[in-house]
Amino acid sequence: MQTTDVVDIRIEQELKEILEHLQNKGWEPLLCDSPIPFYDSAVMCGNPTMTGDVVMETKLIPKELLGMQPEFLITVQGDSMKDADIQSGDTVKILMTQNIHDGDIVLARIDDEFTLKSYCEDENGESWLIPQNEAYSAFSLSDKLNVSILGIVKEVVKKAPRISYRDCMKLIKKAKAKQMVHKEISQLQISRAIRKIAPLVEIARHWYAVYRVMADLNIVGEDDFDAFIDMIKTEVNGHQSLPTRTELQRMAVQSFAKPVILWNSSNAPVQGKRYQDYLKIARTMEELLTT
């Protein structure tokens, strides 16, 4: 077996393990394994424009995202569709179809010019192409124009943002400063914070938000619920709803099992207002301990 074959097998195995790991964590990864045409020309999100000499390449996308009808990718340029969250530099996947409905975003060809706009028919049956930016005007597809609709936008692939080194360093310095504050938290400050946060705690499970912050700050150990409970009982023993190990463990699931900064309302053991209540307690406790 050649060295390249061994490397390919190892990469394939690593990729398989990564996909399985992501699936176990609740993600839904898709493997880019199917080629689709990609035209090396920008379609204007502004006034119609000539495409010039178009060079076709191919890009790989997951087969799960491919339909039965022909599709291709093209890059967006301009800002006339910004209110539809289609920005310059994004890539759009065009489904070639004549089955157009009001509100669809279409790739239209006007004579030898191309543009990306929303499509709609008015009450008189007249067809319009409409930008999603008030700086641009809609225009009708009158009989005087040689217009054809090539297809509709099926998917938008966002241009990945890149954070500047300067902004990264600002965040790193902020995190380091926060770590230094964490190391300087005194027992007196902890005691005061617990007593001040207690009135916000209406049920025993709310104490989990307090515990999670204290664990994030290394005041108590991860999953050391007993030490936390003893600390709360020492400071506010007369509280109407003292924490219990059972109630705390019930909340240590999904995103709540992670640091507060990673909490996610769509993946939490409580939703809506109850989620906001926990988040408010956590943020208030962190502020009491770090300021």
Image: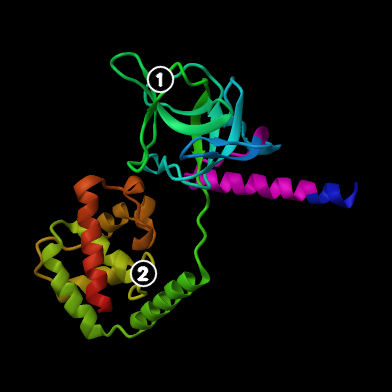
Which residue is at 19% across, 48% downward? 273
Q: Which residue was labeled with disc 1?
A: 101
| 141 vs 173, nearest the viewer | 141
Left-right relation of 59 to 211: right
Whichever of labels 2 and 1 marks the residue nearer the N terminus, that label is 1
Q: Which residue is mark 2?
A: 216
Q: Nearer the viewer, residue 156 or 251?
A: 156
Position above or below: 185 against 117: below
Dot 2 falls on a residue whose secondary structure is: helix
Q: Residue at position x 46%, y 40% from top?
A: 46
Q: Quadrant of the C terminus?
A: bottom left
Is 24 covered by the magenta stretch? yes
Is residue 205 visible in the rendered image? The answer is no
Magenta-highlighted residues? 8-37
- Amino acid at the residue labelled 1: His
Asked whether, in this view, residue 87 is left or right of residue 4, the answer is left
Residue 141 x %, y % = 43, 21
Image height of 239 relative to 127, above or below: below
Q: Is residue 144 left or right of residue 220?
A: right
| Vertical comparison of 22 with 202: above or below | above
